[in-house]
Image: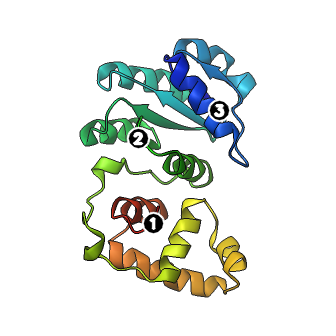
Amino acid sequence: MLIEDNAIYRAGLSSMLGLEYGIDVVAQYASPARAIPLMPHAAPDVVLLGVDDTGQEAEEALTRLLPALPRRGQVVVLGGHGDASTGQDLVRLGARAYLPKDVTPSYLVSVICMAHFYGRRTAVPPDAVPVRSRAADVTLSTREREIVRLVAKAMTNAQIGRHLHITEGTVKRHLSNVFNKLHAVSRMDAVNKASAACLIE
């Protein structure tokens, strides 16, 4: 479900997401007030909530929206800027991720997938990630980068193993190495840090 008051931006999101395999836009509204009464009927897995004022107004919109979600529904907030403290506040309130509106389409899709499949794990706002800013600071092998890219597509270890024709145990070992190198605390954290350090697209 898309909630965004800018009609052009909302239409662009809808068109872009409609091209993604496995993602269906079930409804789109200009405001939470219009979306909440119809939430039980639409039953979205993930809500993209667009906000311009990333202060109290955004917090109030999120607070109204969360109780109306289906049992396993998640909210990803798209804000007008990438303020780290704002993102952390919204994540603490219950959003699964806070992203700036100029996020790349591939990154947004990966966060949507991770919010759905790993909803109990908090997605870290990009600007809140303590990144080693240059790729030279961290080196991932070709196989490790390949695995992180597949993790970003919300694939499980078993699915990654089948895709790469390696055992699930080998996938776990590579991911353990990635976690250690990036000082990551979760799969989403590893994806965020690898992307921010330009180790993956």
Task: Give the answer, above or below, for where 118 lies relative to 102.
Answer: below
Residue 185: x, y in percent?
39, 66
Q: Which is more N-terminal, label 1 or label 2?
A: 2
Residue 82 image-quadrant placement = top left
Between discs 3 and 2, the one toward the N terminus: 3
Residues 5 and 35: in front is 5
* CA separation in Å, label 3 and label 2: 19 Å
Amino acid type indicated by mark 1 = Ile
Q: Residues within 10 Å of mark 1 (few under 14, many from 20)?
A: some
The residue identified by callout 3 is: 15
Q: Residue at label 1?
A: 200
Give the percent coordinates (x, y) of residue 66.
52, 29
Q: Secondary structure at mark 2?
A: strand
Dot 3 or dot 1: first in sequence order is: 3
The answer to whether the residues at label 2 and label 1 have Cβ atoms under 8 Å apart is no
Residue beneath the point at 60% across and 51% down? 113
Label 3 neighbour load within 10 Å: few <14, some 14-19, many 20+: few
Judge left or right: residue 197 versus residue 117: left
- Residue at x-position 64% and y-position 64%: 155
Residue 134 as seen in the image, left or right of residue 103: left
- Residue at 50% across / 29% down in the picture? 49
The residue indicated by pointer 2 is: 99
Which amino acid does the dot numbered 2 rest on? Leu
